[in-house]
Image: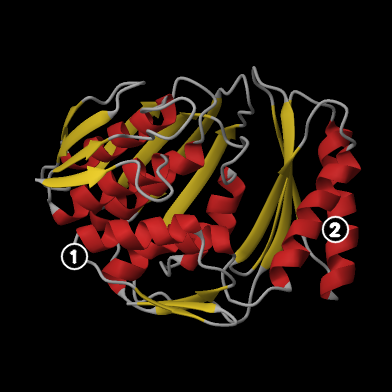
């Protein structure tokens, strides 16, 4: 059994989510201790437990300690199989982070995941970022991973619902696209239609002017128990999102997303730093290389964790950071 210090380096939920995924794909049982020990609210939170349940569903994994507040988790994987998993985070916890844990395992045999929780919440990638930046960067054929957003869920009410379908894949080496796609997706729930429209218009004006191209927009609205809005913009393997809040003009939400993406586009590297740590499991398993602008603490944590499972990532730091395997 592999024993993992859950407080090491970044010391957050990323260690838990990634460790159970790696346990499933390698068949190595794990024990994680001191989970999030340095956090104000230490131990597992609802979204971490949901990610563990999603991975366990793919491999009939046995767990011990998978409950909110627990500082120790045992995970023993079985054989990976095609599965249909239904997971309710129970809060507005991030659906995108649950997907990060489940997806590397599901690619092995395929399957479906239906998750209830938050589609766009603070300090997490939006589901739109996952669909338009993360998944295309994995190098799987178009349509091999489909994301259906049935209902939007914003903090604090949550209630979002997303269904993801994956065909069995053996992706090739990571090689990010040199001819990038771009887009803006502006979304809302429980708000007037003009909110998402104004977000999109302000983001498009700013981003099209900076990039010198006409950036397409998509507007998605849903009704549910949560109220909120978001704007996600992307250009190739770089993306940026902003969330609405009471009293914040819709135009400012759109401009924040556009400005954040412009800043990333002007930095060196193919991937934005937030994407870099999300790609490292695929890089370790399938090889390849990619560049980014900085070696973040999250990426350092992932390289340390991957090494525990026998995967070595080469990192070369300079004007840009090069990851290869």
Q: Residue at x 34, y 75 (%)?
A: 172
Q: How is the image coloured?
A: secondary structure
Residue 154 in percent (x, y) is at 64, 28
Query: Which element type, helix, strand or loop, lies under badge 2?
Result: helix
| Drawn side of residue 151 relative to residue 107, left or right | right
From the viewer's perspective, is residue 175 above or below residue 20?
A: below
Residue that carries the numbered disc 2 in the rendered image? 204
Can residue 144 be seen in this snapshot? no
From the viewer's perspective, is residue 210 above or below residue 194?
A: below
**Given this view, does label 1 or label 2 mark the residue nearer the observer?**
1
**Which sits in the foreground, 295 or 309?**
295
Residue 281 in percent (x, y) is at 34, 61
Residue 68 in percent (x, y) is at 36, 21
Residue at mark 1 to residue at mark 2: CA–CA distance: 45 Å
Q: Residue at x 41, y 48 (%)?
A: 100
Q: Residue furthest front?
A: 38
Can residue 193 be seen in this snapshot? yes
Residue that carries the numbered disc 1 in the rendered image? 310
Q: Quadrant of the N terminus?
A: top left
Density class for disc 1 (Cα within 10 Å; few <14, some 14-19, many ≥20) is few
| Drawn side of residue 196 relative to residue 98, left or right | right
Density class for disc 2 (Cα within 10 Å; few <14, some 14-19, many ≥20) is many
From the viewer's perspective, is residue 268 above or below residue 8?
A: below
Residue 238 in percent (x, y) is at 63, 65
Query: Which element type, helix, strand or loop, lies under badge 1?
Result: loop
From the viewer's perspective, is residue 137 above or below residue 37?
A: below
| Drawn side of residue 150 relative to residue 249, left or right | left
**Which sits in the foreground, 149 or 10?**
10
Q: Quadrant of the C terminus?
A: bottom left
- Is label 1 in contact with label 2 (beta carbons under 8 Å)? no
């Amino acid at each position: 059994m592999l024993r993992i210090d859950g407080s090491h380096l970044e010391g957050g939920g990323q260690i838990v989510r990634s460790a159970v995924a790696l346990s499933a794909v390698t068949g190595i049982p794990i024990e994680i201790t001191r989970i999030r020990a340095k956090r104000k609210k230490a131990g597992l939170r609802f979204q971490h437990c949901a990610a563990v349940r999603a991975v366990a569903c793919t491999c009939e994994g046995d767990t011990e300690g998978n409950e909110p507040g627990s500082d120790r988790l045992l995970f023993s994987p079985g054989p990976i199989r095609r599965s249909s998993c239904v997971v309710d985070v129970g809060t507005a916890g991030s659906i995108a982070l649950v997907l990060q844990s489940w997806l590397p395992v599901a690619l092995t045999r395929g399957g479906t995941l239906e998750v209830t929780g938050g589609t766009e919440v603070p300090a997490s990638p939006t589901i739109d970022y996952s669909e338009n930046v993360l998944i295309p960067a994995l190098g799987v054929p178009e349509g091999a991973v489909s994301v259906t957003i049935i209902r939007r869920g914003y903090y604090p009410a949550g209630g979002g619902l997303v269904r993801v379908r994956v065909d069995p894949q053996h992706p090739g080496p990571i090689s990010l696209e040199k001819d990038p796609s771009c887009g803006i997706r502006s979304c809302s729930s429980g708000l007037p239609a003009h909110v998402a429209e104004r977000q999109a218009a302000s983001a498009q004006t700013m981003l099209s002017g900076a990039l010198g191209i006409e950036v397409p927009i998509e507007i998605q609205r849903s009704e549910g128990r949560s109220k909120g809005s978001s704007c996600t913009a992307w250009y190739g393997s770089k993306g940026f999102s902003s969330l609405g809040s009471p009293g914040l003009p819709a135009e400012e939400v759109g401009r924040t997303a556009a400005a954040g993406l412009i800043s990333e586009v002007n930095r060196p590297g193919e991937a934005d730093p937030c994407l870099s740590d999300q790609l490292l499991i695929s890089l370790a398993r399938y090889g390849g290389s990619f560049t980014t602008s900085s070696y973040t603490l999250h990426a350092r944590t992932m390289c340390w964790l991957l090494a525990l499972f026998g995967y070595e990532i080469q990192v070369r730091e300079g004007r840009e950071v090069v990851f290869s395997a």
